[in-house]
C-alpha cells in the first residue's frame, strides 16, 4: 500500500514540478523538510500473509468520547474514535514519519507556501465527494474564533488557504514552520471535515476507514467498515466495537475472558501480569511518549532560588522511581519525550540528574536551610494512579535530604486551572505526545502566559526556543532541542522524572496487523485483521 | 457473644491508639521490591510500590477506625441532642427539624461525600464531618421515637404533676430508657460507617496518600490480584474483622438488653 | 393514619425543593466547571471556554440558572446532558430501570436465601442454627464491593469463558439480560438476606413457643399452615420495611457494583456526572433518588406505626 502511494506520487510530482517550472532549491526542500516521505516500515513485513476479511474487533476502552467533531473536540478520549472516522491530508506512519493520506502529493515553492494536490475519487461517509472546498472549509472553521477550536493555536501560522481547483489547495503561512506538516498529520487536529454537514458532534461524517453506526453512552460504540475507503483493500474488519469499562481490573478480566480482543493499560505491571498469565495475548509497549514532570512555581521563595531547585533534583533518584513505579518499563526523561525530534533517550548525562543526597543537603545549607525545608503542598492528578504512586516515592526520597512535602491529590479540572495560572508550589501533571516539541518547551517562555505564571525570566532560553522553532533541518533541530533540555535541567526549572509510553497495549494473538503508534491513537486498526 | 465482641473491640482500640508503634515498618517507606509475597522481612509481603503490607494494614486501621469512632461519636451526640429536642418539644419545631433532617437523609451519601471532598479537599477532618452529617438524622430518629412514647408514660406524668422540672424528667426518667436502643443503633452505625468509609476510599474520596487506608488499598490492589493476592485479601480481611466486631457487639447488646422493639 | 400519610406526602415537596437547591449550590461550590473539565489537558483560550459556557447558560447568575431549571422542570423537561447534548430524562429512565431491575432481582434473591436459611435455622436448631447465624454474620461484614471484586477475579481466573461483562439490555435479549444481572445482584443480595434470615428465624421461634399452636393442632389444622399464616402476618412487615430501607439506600451501594460489573445504572451515571460537572444530570439524579428515599421512608413509618401501636405521631 505504502509503495503504491509513493510511486504514484513521484510520477505525478515529476509532471507537476515540470509544469510549475520550479527551482532546484524547492526540490531539495521536498526531500529534506520536516515532512519526509514515508518509509515502508513494519507494515510491509506484516503483509506477507494474506489478511482475512471480515469479523468484528472488540476493543476495551476506559473512557467515553466527548463529542465527535474533530474541529471542536477537546477530550483525549474522543481521539480513538476520530482516528477511525476521519482522515487528513497527511498521517503518521508506524515509524513516526509523516506520510501522504488525502494528499496525493505536494510542493513547497518557498518557505511559506505549500501547494497540495488532493487524492481524487474520495467520498465522505454520506456519499459527498471530497474536494478542495472541504479542505478550505475545515481550516476556515478551525481558525474561526466562534468555533473555539483547540486546533486554532496550532494552525495560527496560516495566513491563507486558497482553492486553486477542485483538487488543489494552497496554504500560505505567515512564517516558515518546521512543524506545519506534522500538525496536518495529527488526528484530530488536521483531519478534514465535510462542507455543509451540520452536527458532527453526534453524527460524525468523515473520510476515514470506518463509518459511525451507533453509540450507547457508557456501554458501547459501534463502527462499520467504510466500503468506499480509498486505500486498496482496507479496512479488513467489517465491524469495530468499543466497549467501555470503568477501571483497570474490569478491563483485565474482560480481556482474559475474551469479552474484548484488545485494549490498553495504564500500568505496565498490570499489562505484564496479564500477558504472562495468558499465552495467547500479545503486547507492545509503544514508544515512550509521556513525561512525568514536577513543575515548580518560581515566583516566590524558596523556588526562586536555583540552589533549592538543584537540591531537589539531586535528591531525586530517577532510576529508582522508574524501577519502583513502572517496573523498569520506561526511561529517565527530560523535557521532550524520546520518540520525537530532539528527545532525550534516557542515556547520557543531564545536569543534576545523578542522585547525590549529600550534595543536595549542602546546597540547601548554602541557600539558608541547614535543617531541611518544608516545601508545602505537592499537587498531583488524583485519577492517575501512576502519578500518585511516583509522588509518594519522591516524597520518601526527598525526605532523606530533609525536604518535606505534603501530597495533595486533586481532580483534573481544578488542577489544570491552578497549573495554567501558576498558583501552586509543586505540581505534577504529565505531558503527552504532541507533534511538535516546541509546544512542550515553549511553556517555559517568559513571554508566554504560562511562563509568566510560574515566574520564568530567562532571556537566553527564550532566544534558544524561538530560534529552534524556525530551524527546518531535522538534525539541526534535534541538536537545538537537546541544548534547550540541557539548559532546563541545569537550571532545574522543572524536574523531569521519567518518560514512558502513554499506554501499554495488549491484544489477543489472533488480532493481526495492528501496530501501536507513539501518537497514541489507534489508526492502525485500518490494517488489522482477525485470524479466527 | 458480648464477651467475644468486647475482645474484638479491645483489639481495635489498641490498634487505633498504638498503631504507629506496633507497625514494624514506616508504612510510607517505598522500595523497589514491589508486590512481593510473604517473606521473613515482610510478613504479608509488599504493595505496588514496595511498602510493607502489614504496617500499612495496621496504620490504615488506625486511620479508618479513628475516623469511624470520632465521626460516630459526633453523630451520636448531635443525634441525641436533636432527637431529645424533637421528641420532647414536639409540635412545629419537631416537624421542621425533622424535615430538615429528612433533606439530609434523602441526599445520596456519595454525592454529599464527593461534594465535600471536591470542595474542601480530601482529609481526615472533612471525612469525619461528612460521615457525621450523614448519620446524624438516623440517630436522631432512633432517639426521637422512644422519647415520643416515653414522655406520655404514667410515672413520667406523675413526676410532672408532682412538680419535677422537665430537665430532671428528661435526664432521670427518659434518658435511661433510650440508652438501649441508642447503644444498639450506635454499634450498627459503627459497622455501617466502616462500610461507608471503605467504600468512599474505594472510590478515591478517602484520606489522601500516602496515609494508608483499607478502602483505598483494596481498590488499588484489584489490578494486581493475581500477582499478589495478599494485597487484596489483607485489606478485605481487615474490613471484615472490623465490621464483624461491631455487628457482634450489636447482637450481644441486643441479647443483653433484651430490646423487644421490632 | 391517612391524615398522617397525606401530611408526610405534602412535606415531600418542600423537602425536594430544599434538596434540589442544596444540590445546585453544592455542584457550583466544586472547583472547576464543565468547560474546564471537558477541556482536560488541552489548553483552551479563556474566550473559547466562555463560548462553551455561554452555550450552556453557565454565564448567567446562579439564581437565574436555578429558576430556569425549575421552570423547565415544571414543564417536565429535565434539560440536556452537557456531554451528550441529549435530553437527560431520556438517558435517566433506562438507567433507573436498570438499577431498579438490579435491586429487584437482588431483593428476590435475598428473600429466597434469607427465608430459607432463617427457616432452616429455626426448625433444626443446634448446629444448623449456629452455622447459619455464623455465616450471616460473615455476609453482613463483607462489603458488597469486596464480594463483587472476588467474584470477578475468580470468574476471570477459573472460568475465563464465562462472559461477566456481557450486559445486554432487556429489550434486546431478556434471557441474556437476566443472566448478566445474576452475579451483580448476588453481590448485593447477600447482606440484605441476613436481616431477612434473622427476622424469619425470630418469627418462627416465636410461633413454636405459642400455645395457640397446640390449640390449632387440637382443632385439626396443620402446623405448617399456622406457621405460614403467622409468618405472613408478623414477619413479613419488618422484612419488607427493612428490605425496603436497604434497597432504597442501594443507590449508593450500587455505584460500586455497577462500576465493577459495568452495568449502566444510576450510580455510575451520578459519579460520572459529578466528575464531569454535568449539572443537569446531577440535578435530575438527586431529585429522583431523593424522591425514592422519601417515599420509602413514608412507607416504612406507616408500617412501623401499624406494628407498634404505642408510638404516637402528634
Image: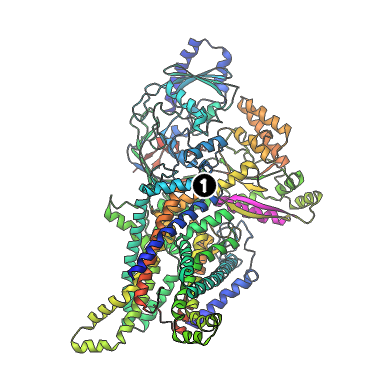
- Subunit bearing disc 1: C
Residue that label 1 marks: C62
Q: Quadrant of the C terminus of chain C?
A: bottom left
**Count of marks, rendered view:** 1
Q: Residue A302: image x %, image y %? A: 74, 48
Q: Is residue C1 magenta?
A: no
Q: Is residue A205 above or below residue A365?
A: above
Q: Is residue A378 magenta?
A: yes
Q: Residue B261: image x %, image y %? A: 40, 79
Residue beneath the point at 54% across and 77% down: B9
Residue span colored magenta: A373-400
Residue beneath the point at 53% across and 38% down: C49
Q: Does residue C135 appear in the picture of this structure?
A: yes
Q: Is residue A158 above or below residue A371?
A: above
Q: Is A377 on the left or on the right of A4, as rendered?
A: right
Q: Quadrant of the N terminus of chain C?
A: bottom left
Amino acid at each position: 500500500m505504502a509503495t503504491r502511494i509513493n510511486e504514484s506520487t513521484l510520477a505525478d510530482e515529476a509532471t507537476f514540478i515540470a509544469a510549475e517550472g520550479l527551482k532546484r532549491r524547492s526540490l531539495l526542500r521536498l526531500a529534506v523538510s520536516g515532512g519526509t516521505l514515508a518509509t515502508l516500515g513494519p507494515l510491509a513485513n506484516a503483509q506477507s500473509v494474506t489478511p482475512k476479511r471480515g469479523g468484528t474487533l472488540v476493543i476495551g476502552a476506559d473512557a467515553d468520547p466527548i463529542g465527535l467533531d474533530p474541529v471542536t473536540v477537546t477530550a483525549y478520549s474522543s481521539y480513538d474514535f476520530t482516528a477511525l472516522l476521519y482522515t487528513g491530508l497527511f498521517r503518521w506512519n508506524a515509524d513516526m514519519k509523516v506520510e501522504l493520506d488525502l494528499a496525493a502529493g505536494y510542493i513547497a515553492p518557498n518557505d511559506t507556501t505549500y501547494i497540495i494536490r488532493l487524492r481524487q475519487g474520495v467520498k465522505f461517509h454520506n456519499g459527498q465527494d471530497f474536494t478542495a472546498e472541504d479542505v478550505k472549509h475545515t481550516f476556515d472553521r478551525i481558525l474561526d474564533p466562534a468555533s473555539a477550536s483547540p486546533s486554532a493555536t496550532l494552525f495560527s501560522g496560516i495566513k491563507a488557504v486558497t482553492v486553486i481547483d477542485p483538487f488543489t489547495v494552497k496554504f500560505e503561512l505567515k512564517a516558515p514552520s518546521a512543524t506545519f506538516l506534522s500538525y496536518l498529520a495529527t488526528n484530530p487536529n488536521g483531519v478534514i471535515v465535510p462542507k455543509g454537514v451540520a452536527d458532527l458532534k453526534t453524527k460524525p461524517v468523515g473520510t476515514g476507514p470506518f463509518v459511525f453506526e451507533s453509540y450507547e453512552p457508557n456501554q458501547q460504540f459501534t463502527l462499520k467498515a467504510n466500503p468506499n475507503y480509498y486505500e486498496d483493500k482496507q479496512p479488513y474488519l467489517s465491524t469495530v466495537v468499543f466497549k467501555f469499562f470503568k477501571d483497570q481490573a474490569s478491563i483485565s478480566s474482560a480481556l482474559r475472558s475474551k469479552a474484548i480482543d484488545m485494549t490498553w493499560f495504564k500500568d505496565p505491571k498490570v499489562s505484564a501480569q496479564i500477558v504472562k498469565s495468558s499465552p495467547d495475548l500479545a503486547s507492545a509497549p509503544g514508544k515512550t511518549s509521556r513525561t512525568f514532570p514536577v513543575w515548580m512555581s518560581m515566583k516566590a521563595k524558596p523556588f526562586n532560588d536555583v540552589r533549592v531547585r538543584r537540591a531537589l533534583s539531586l535528591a531525586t533518584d530517577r532510576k529508582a522511581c522508574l524501577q519502583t513505579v513502572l517496573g523498569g518499563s520506561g526511561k529517565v526523561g527530560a523535557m521532550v519525550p524520546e520518540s520525537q525530534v530532539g528527545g532525550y533517550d534516557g542515556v547520557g548525562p543531564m545536569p543534576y540528574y545523578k542522585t547525590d543526597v549529600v550534595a543536595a543537603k549542602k546546597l540547601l545549607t548554602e541557600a539558608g536551610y541547614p535543617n531541611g525545608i518544608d516545601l508545602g503542598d505537592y499537587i498531583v492528578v488524583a485519577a492517575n494512579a501512576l502519578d500518585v504512586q511516583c509522588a509518594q516515592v519522591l516524597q520518601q526520597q526527598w525526605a532523606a535530604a530533609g525536604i518535606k512535602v505534603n501530597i495533595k491529590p486533586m481532580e483534573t479540572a481544578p488542577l489544570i486551572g491552578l497549573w495554567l495560572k501558576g498558583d501552586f508550589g509543586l505540581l505534577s501533571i504529565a505531558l503527552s505526545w504532541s507533534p511538535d516539541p516546541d509546544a512542550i518547551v515553549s511553556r517555559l517562555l517568559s513571554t508566554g502566559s504560562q511562563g509568566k505564571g510560574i515566574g520564568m525570566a530567562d532571556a537566553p532560553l527564550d532566544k534558544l526556543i524561538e530560534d529552534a522553532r524556525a530551524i527546518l533541518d531535522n538534525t539541526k533541530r534535534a541538536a537545538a532541542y537537546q541544548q534547550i533540555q540541557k539548559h532546563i535541567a541545569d537550571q532545574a526549572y522543572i524536574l523531569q522524572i521519567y518518560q514512558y509510553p502513554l499506554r501499554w497495549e495488549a491484544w489477543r494473538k489472533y488480532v493481526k496487523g495492528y501496530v501501536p503508534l507513539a501518537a497514541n491513537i489507534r489508526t492502525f486498526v485500518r490494517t488489522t485483521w482477525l485470524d479466527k | 457473644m458480648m464477651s467475644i465482641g468486647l475482645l474484638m473491640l479491645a483489639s481495635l482500640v489498641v490498634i487505633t491508639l498504638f498503631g504507629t508503634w506496633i507497625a514494624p515498618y514506616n508504612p510510607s517507606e517505598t522500595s523497589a521490591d514491589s508486590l512481593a509475597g510473604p517473606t521473613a522481612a515482610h510478613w504479608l509481603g509488599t504493595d505496588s510500590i514496595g511498602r510493607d503490607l502489614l504496617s500499612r494494614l495496621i496504620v490504615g486501621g488506625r486511620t479508618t477506625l479513628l475516623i469511624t469512632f470520632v465521626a460516630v461519636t459526633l453523630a451520636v451526640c448531635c443525634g441525641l441532642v436533636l432527637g431529645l429536642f424533637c421528641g420532647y418539644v414536639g409540635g412545629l419545631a419537631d416537624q421542621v427539624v425533622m424535615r430538615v433532617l429528612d433533606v439530609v437523609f434523602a441526599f445520596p451519601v456519595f454525592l454529599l461525600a464527593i461534594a465535600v471532598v471536591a470542595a474542601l479537599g480530601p482529609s481526615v477532618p472533612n471525612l469525619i464531618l461528612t460521615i457525621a452529617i450523614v448519620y446524624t438524622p438516623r440517630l436522631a430518629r432512633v432517639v426521637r421515637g422512644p422519647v415520643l412514647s416515653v414522655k406520655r408514660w404514667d410515672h413520667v406524668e406523675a413526676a410532672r404533676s408532682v412538680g419535677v422540672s422537665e430537665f430532671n424528667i428528661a435526664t432521670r426518667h427518659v434518658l435511661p430508657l433510650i440508652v438501649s436502643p441508642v447503644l444498639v443503633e450506635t454499634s450498627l452505625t459503627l459497622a455501617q460507617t466502616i462500610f461507608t468509609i471503605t467504600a468512599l476510599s474505594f472510590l478515591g474520596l478517602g484520606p489522601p496518600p500516602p496515609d494508608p487506608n483499607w478502602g483505598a488499598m483494596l481498590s488499588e490492589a484489584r489490578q494486581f490480584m493475581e500477582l499478589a493476592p495478599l494485597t487484596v485479601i489483607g485489606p478485605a480481611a481487615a474490613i471484615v474483622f472490623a465490621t464483624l466486631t461491631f455487628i457482634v457487639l450489636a447482637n450481644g447488646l441486643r441479647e443483653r438488653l433484651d430490646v423487644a422493639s421490632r | 393514619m391517612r391524615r398522617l400519610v397525606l401530611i408526610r406526602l405534602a412535606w415531600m415537596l418542600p423537602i425536594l425543593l430544599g434538596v434540589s437547591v442544596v444540590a445546585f449550590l453544592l455542584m457550583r461550590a466544586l472547583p472547576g466547571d464543565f468547560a474546564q473539565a471537558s477541556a482536560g489537558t488541552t489548553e483552551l483560550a479563556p474566550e473559547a471556554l466562555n463560548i462553551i459556557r455561554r452555550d450552556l447558560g453557565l454565564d448567567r447568575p446562579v439564581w437565574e440558572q436555578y429558576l430556569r431549571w425549575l421552570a423547565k422542570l415544571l414543564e417536565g423537561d429535565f434539560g440536556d446532558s452537557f456531554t451528550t447534548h441529549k435530553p437527560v430524562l431520556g438517558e435517566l429512565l433506562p438507567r433507573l430501570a436498570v438499577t431498579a431491575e438490579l435491586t429487584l432481582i437482588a431483593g428476590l434473591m435475598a428473600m429466597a436465601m434469607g427465608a430459607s436459611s432463617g427457616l432452616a435455622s429455626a426448625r433444626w436448631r443446634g448446629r444448623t442454627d449456629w452455622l447459619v447465624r455464623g455465616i450471616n454474620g460473615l455476609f453482613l461484614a463483607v462489603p458488597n464491593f469486596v464480594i463483587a471484586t472476588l467474584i470477578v477475579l475468580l470468574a476471570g481466573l477459573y472460568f475465563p469463558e464465562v462472559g461477566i461483562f456481557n450486559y445486554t439490555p432487556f429489550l434486546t435479549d431478556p434471557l441474556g439480560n437476566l443472566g448478566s444481572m445474576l452475579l451483580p445482584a448476588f453481590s448485593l443480595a447477600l447482606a440484605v438476606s441476613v436481616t431477612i434470615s434473622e427476622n424469619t428465624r425470630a418469627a418462627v421461634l416465636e410461633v413454636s413457643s405459642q400455645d395457640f399452636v397446640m390449640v390449632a393442632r387440637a382443632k385439626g389444622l396443620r402446623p405448617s399452615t399456622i406457621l405460614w399464616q403467622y409468618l405472613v402476618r408478623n414477619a413479613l412487615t419488618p422484612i419488607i420495611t427493612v428490605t425496603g430501607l436497604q434497597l432504597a439506600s442501594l443507590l449508593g451501594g450500587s455505584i460500586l457494583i455497577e462500576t465493577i460489573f459495568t452495568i449502566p445504572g444510576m450510580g455510575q451515571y451520578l459519579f460520572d456526572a459529578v466528575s464531569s460537572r454535568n449539572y443537569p444530570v446531577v440535578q435530575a439524579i438527586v431529585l429522583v433518588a431523593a424522591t425514592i428515599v422519601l417515599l420509602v421512608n413514608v412507607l416504612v413509618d406507616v408500617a412501623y406505626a401499624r406494628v407498634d401501636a404505642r408510638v404516637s405521631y402528634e
